[in-house]
């Protein structure tokens, strides 16, 4: 059963107070058929380059969530329909992109959760630059590889530990 972010916040006020549970600023648009998703976080930091994004999503997801710090770039898309279909097929729960996506209609047909700043028709470069499994700063929140993410239509939460109500 999916946990509602509002209920998580209500039940964990002390964790919010001490910073173990953090809410991302509400800057993301909702894409994909799965509006509610959660999972352990895998972090990636890239800038206008999507080679590492594709590489990660070709791995088995095991219900994890890929959190991509794309530097907030609005100049191109670092995630498109083909990698999202691979992510769905490989068992990823969701992808959060601090940047843009493209192939929105294709992504919206996939049973996976996707959050991004917006859409852009220009594709990313393919150099393979970036950092894997490093701390990232997205939407006013520092996120670490291995933490847990909970997303629904109210917002996105990050917790140091797996939560249940």
Image (spheres, rainbow, N blue to C red):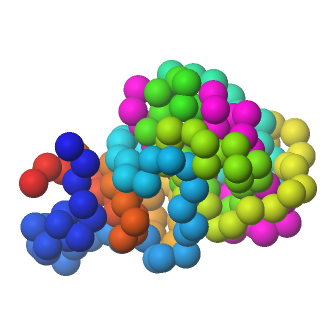
From this viewpoint, is residue 56 visible?
A: no
For the magenta stretch, what is the residue range?
Answer: 61-86
Between 131 and 13, the one nearer to me in the picture: 13
Quadrant assignment for the C terminus: bottom left
Quarter-of-image position of residue 73: bottom right
Between 104 and 9, the one nearer to me in the picture: 104
Q: Residue 42: horizontal and vertical position, in percent?
A: 48, 41
Quadrant assignment for the N terminus: top left
Q: Residue at x 71, y 53 (%)?
A: 104
In the rendered image, residue 89 lying in the magenta stretch gets the answer no
Q: Residue 81: horizontal and vertical position, in percent?
A: 72, 40
Q: Residue at x 76, y 53 (%)?
A: 102
Would you place residue 156 above or below residue 122 in this image?
Answer: below
Give the total of numbered labels.
Answer: 0
Between 25 and 108, the one nearer to me in the picture: 108
Quarter-of-image position of residue 39: top left
């Amino acid at each position: 059963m999916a946990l509602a972010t509002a209920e998580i916040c209500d039940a964990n006020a002390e964790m919010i107070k001490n910073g173990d549970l953090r809410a991302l600023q509400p800057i993301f648009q909702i894409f994909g058929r799965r509006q509610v998703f959660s999972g352990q976080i895998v972090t990636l930091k890239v800038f206008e380059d999507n080679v590492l994004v594709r590489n990660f999503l070709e791995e088995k997801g095991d219900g994890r969530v890929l959190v991509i710090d794309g530097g907030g770039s609005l100049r191109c898309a670092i995630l498109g329909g083909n990698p999202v279909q691979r992510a769905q097929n490989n068992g990823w729960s969701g992808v959060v992109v601090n940047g843009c996506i493209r192939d929105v209609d294709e992504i919206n047909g996939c049973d996976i959760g996707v959050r991004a700043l917006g859409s852009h028709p220009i594709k990313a470069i393919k150099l393979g630059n970036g950092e894997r499994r490093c701390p990232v700063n997205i939407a006013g929140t520092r996120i670490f590889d291995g933490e847990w993410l909970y997303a629904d239509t109210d917002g996105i939460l990050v917790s140091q530990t797996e939560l249940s109500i």
